[in-house]
Image: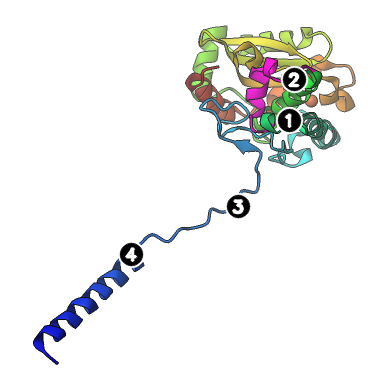
């Protein structure tokens, strides 16, 4: 074998070796682990359903409760929780999907986007989307801002801002409970960040959400009778008072932070 051919073979072998090394060093694609919940979708920089994302409408799904039915016993009994989550919230989800079944374009929007721009929803399904999309969003927020370990005084930044805005935590609770008690019929009482960036207590009728008025819902209590009737009968005031025993301040602080970063 000539010196020239030996050199050529050595050159080809070196090239092949180099190629093998380069291929073996390439990052191996790793399949993403399937998410157990596909409820949230990040389609906006201002998520409202959770600081983690907005609510998907393709299709809407009932989120799991983050605790047992009996876990909030300091304020709400297990039977009410089961009916509320598995019955009422599930109905809002099913009815929303039913309303959107002929509207594939709308299904690509988040529930929040649909509620912010209801005029974009065809008139024949607008009320159904408003009530059931709102019901789905409101209850998704509600389960997260309660906790078996909740209650007590507010913590971190929200504590200071509540004191600054309302004078004290006690005065804030009093005003919040008063507004919830005065809400005629069914609805919600909320602490929101209003379009001016300030904390404010507001109420909404039925299943409306504050994002429909350009405000960001930081925390809210459900004052529909279905939220308290089994234990409290018609005593909404007693329910409003006990509810503070399960309020999840760490989650509310996260939401308050999100509210400052959002356009709501
Ligand atoms: Fe409810």
* Mark 3, other Cα within 10 Å: few <14 / some 14–19 / many ≥20: few
Residue placed under numbered mark 4 in the picture: 25
Image location (x, y in percent) of residue 24: 35, 68
| Mark sitting on residue 103 | 1
Please say whether residue 142 is one of the residues in the magenta stretch.
no
Name which residue lies at 31% across and 72% down.
20
User: Is mark 4 in CB contact (under 8 Å) with mark 1?
Assistant: no
Residue depth check, mark 4 versus mark 3: number of the one nearer the observer? 4
| Mark sitting on residue 122 | 2
Secondary structure under badge 3?
loop
| Mark sitting on residue 34 | 3
Residue depth check, mark 1 versus mark 3: number of the one nearer the observer? 1
Q: Which region of the structure is painted magenta?
A: 107-123
Decide which of 33, 253 is in the foreground and name it.
33
Asked if residue 235 is positioned above or below residue 152 in the image, the reply reads: above
Secondary structure under badge 4?
helix
Earlier in the chain: of badge 4 and badge 2, it is 4
**Residue 56 in which image quadrant:** top right
């Amino acid at each position: 074998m000539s010196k020239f051919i030996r050199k050529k073979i050595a050159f080809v072998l070196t090239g092949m070796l180099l190629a093998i090394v380069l291929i073996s060093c390439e990052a191996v694609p790793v399949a993403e682990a399937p998410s157990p919940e596909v409820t949230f979708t990040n389609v906006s920089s201002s998520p409202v359903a959770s600081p983690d994302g907005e609510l998907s409408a393709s299709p809407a799904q009932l989120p799991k409760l983050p605790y047992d039915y009996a876990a909030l016993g300091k304020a709400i009994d297990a039977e009410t929780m089961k009916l509320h989550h598995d019955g009422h919230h599930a109905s809002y989800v099913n009815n929303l999907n039913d309303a959107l079944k002929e509207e594939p374009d709308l299904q690509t929007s988040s529930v929040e986007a649909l509620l912010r721009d209801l005029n974009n929803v065809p008139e024949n399904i607008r009320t159904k989307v408003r009530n059931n999309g709102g019901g789905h969003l409101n209850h998704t927020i509600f389960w997260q801002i309660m906790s078996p370990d909740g209650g007590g005084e507010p913590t971190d930044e929200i504590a200071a801002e509540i004191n600054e805005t309302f004078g004290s935590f006690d005065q804030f609770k009093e005003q919040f409970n008063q507004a919830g008690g005065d809400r005629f019929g069914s609805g919600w009482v909320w602490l929101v960040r209003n379009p001016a960036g300030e904390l404010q207590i507001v109420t909404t009728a039925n299943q409306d959400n504050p994002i429909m008025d350009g405000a960001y819902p930081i925390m809210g209590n459900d004052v529909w009778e279905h939220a308290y009737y089994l234990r409290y009968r018609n005593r909404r005031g007693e329910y409003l008072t006990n509810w503070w025993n399960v309020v999840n301040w760490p989650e509310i602080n996260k939401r308050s932070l999100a509210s400052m970063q959002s356009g709501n």
